[in-house]
Image: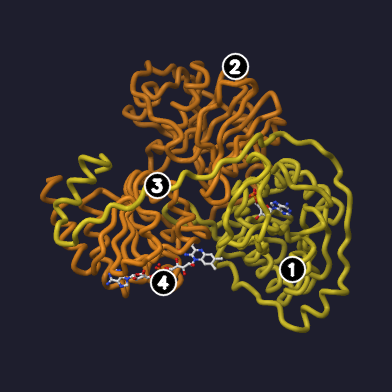
Amino acid sequence: MKILVCITHVPDTTARIAFTDNNTRFDKTGVQYIIGPYDDYALARAVELKEQLGGSITALNVGGSETEPTIRKALAIGADDAVRVDAEPTDSFFVANQIAHVARDGHYDLILMGRESIDYNGGQVHGMVGELLGIPSVSPVMTLIVEGQKVKMTREIEGGKEFVEADMPLVAGCQEPIAEWKIPNMRGIMSARTKPLHVVAPVSDEQRTHVGSYELLPPKAGVKLVDPNDMAGLVNLLKNEAKVI
Amino acid sequence: MATLVFLEIDEGSVKKSSFEAISYASAINAETTAVAFGDLSADDLAKIGKAGATKLLHVTDAPFAQPNSMAYASALAEAMEKTGADTLVLAKSSLGDAIAARTSVKLSASLISNVTSLPGEEGGFSVRKSIYTGKAFANTQSVTSRRVLTLRKNAALIREDGQTVAVEGFQPTVRDADFNVKVLSREKATGEILLPEADIVVSGGRGMKGPENWNLIEGLAQALGAATGCSKPVSDMDWRPHREHVGQTGLKVAPSLYIAVGISGAIQHLAGVNSSKYILVINKDPEAPFFKAADYGVVGDAFEVLPRLTEAVKAQLG
Ligand SMILES: Cc1cc2nc3c(=O)[nH]c(=O)nc-3n(C[C@H](O)[C@H](O)[C@H](O)COP(=O)(O)OP(=O)(O)OC[C@H]3O[C@@H](n4cnc5c(N)ncnc54)[C@H](O)[C@@H]3O)c2cc1C
Ligand SMILES: Nc1ncnc2c1ncn2[C@@H]1O[C@H](COP(=O)(O)O)[C@@H](O)[C@H]1O
């Protein structure tokens, strides 16, 4: 069983979001970076599958050298080796193209990703990689079990869930409760230092979108407090001032 | 050039977000073709025209009856070629996302997701998309001649002044490879207002103390015609199903009114709701961070406030 896990290097969920250079660049000052929370679920499930079925896990990130501590963390959690495609991940097609290239060379049975990255929130890369490789992509996946060449999954749909089955190879975009997040232990952290991390050049520079500028969400004007004994007054505000009910 | 819109059908009806997609597409170009898979009611057919579609490609072939992102992507790519459209518009959803990604690759088109605005007037095709879980926007330009857009809720108002839509049958090519993923079964709450589509959401947090108290949340939701949501600890403790959990690692909602009851307002929860038009917070702690993100607030005990609010809603809305 060969598993490829694609991880993002993203600002911590509590990070302050700000932009610099005339709102053309994300301000990295003081920002803590983590493995994308959904990618962490994908990695955790990969570790469980390897324990159960044997095989190997490769972690993959498309990013500059600053992402290496995040990649080392994936190695500490349980990936056997890692690949970093040395390029800024500026466009989801660009990223998908790099991932598809690595995946083609490695002949993986399963390609696990997060349901979405928490910086660009596209939920796009898995579908694109599936299409580029001509294999199925399923997302968001809440449970995933392997039975021979088949993978059985629960997929969340609006208002419920769907039970699906597909042959490997395939791409899955993972979310909870697929596995419990794994915290690296001391042995993992020590061994991560010597596990191979291959840096490769991007295969293509084709990009299909370009971000001109960024904007922050405008701040709220301030809360209007209503006396808990005056719920008729509150309903009146919602109805006649906000006009939302 | 012309636009194409994917219509998502849920429990036999076209989703509201798909009507938004039609009106959005028709604002880019009046020559808007909608594509629907499966049966349509006469009522929906009329609404498709009113929302701004001039033509409907209707697929009724059996292989396309079940939602299938791979088969739908192939069919939509074929429809793009057939109509000569240069822009495909879909409402963002778990189905829409997968179709959009695969179709964009088939068409060598750009893909912009979470779009919140119509393209700007200045040169090139540039739209605003929501990023960093609703905390910011990126003005994003498409650098290819064709593009695929997924819309966030409320990206466009639904028009009602359109004409009758011309219906044409469409038999897409059936490709075996698109049927690799077999749906074994489906579990779905029926008759419920879908949380991602809801105009009003009433959400409960750990302050509700336990699942036995959810009748208070449901009572208010029912009086308002709202969907119910919850914070992550609430779904982690199985007080509520996982699909109701709102936030950074849950659902992102953008209703007109979000009512948060007994939720502290952690940054990861706010990430899922900060695109709401209005936020009402009910919390007994005046220092709860949620009040900073709110438009209206009630400092009080949910167990006293909720029944009163529900009564007041019933009294004024009848
Ligand atoms: C990586 C990561 C991702 C996360 N993702 C999410 C996410 O997607 N969604 C999410 O919600 N959380 C998420 N969290 C968790 C988040 O940080 C908070 O822990 C969580 O939102 C708190 O839930 P809560 O407000 O219901 O509970 P609490 O923080 O315990 O707040 C309960 C609130 O209820 C009030 N209260 C108590 N009793 C009453 C009463 N009788 N009447 C009125 N008010 C009362 C209290 O004053 C308090 O403000 C995430 C955390 C991490 C680390
Ligand atoms: N730069 C990247 N490097 C590696 N994997 C990525 C990268 N960007 C996105 N992915 C993967 O694709 C998933 C979906 O990302 P997105 O389409 O951006 O929401 C993520 O959860 C990751 O698993």
Residue A162 position in % (x across, y down)? 50, 56
Identified at 35% across, 26% down, the residue is B47
Q: As shown in the figure, which amino acid type bears the numbered disc 3?
A: Ser
Location of residue A98 with respect to A156 vertically, above or below: above
**Foreground mark, 1 or 4?**
1
Residue A201, visible in the rendered structure: yes
State the residue position of label 4: B238
Q: As shown in the figure, which amino acid type bears the numbered disc 2?
A: Met
> Label 1 vs label 3: CA separation?
35 Å
Residue B79 position in % (x across, y down)? 60, 25
Label of residue B95 in the image: none
Identified at 67% across, 62% down, the residue is A33
Q: Residues within 10 Å of mark 2 (few under 14, many from 20)?
A: few
Query: Quick check: marks 1 and 3 in contact, CB under 8 Å?
Result: no
State the residue position of label 1: A74
Identified at 80% across, 63% down, the residue is A68
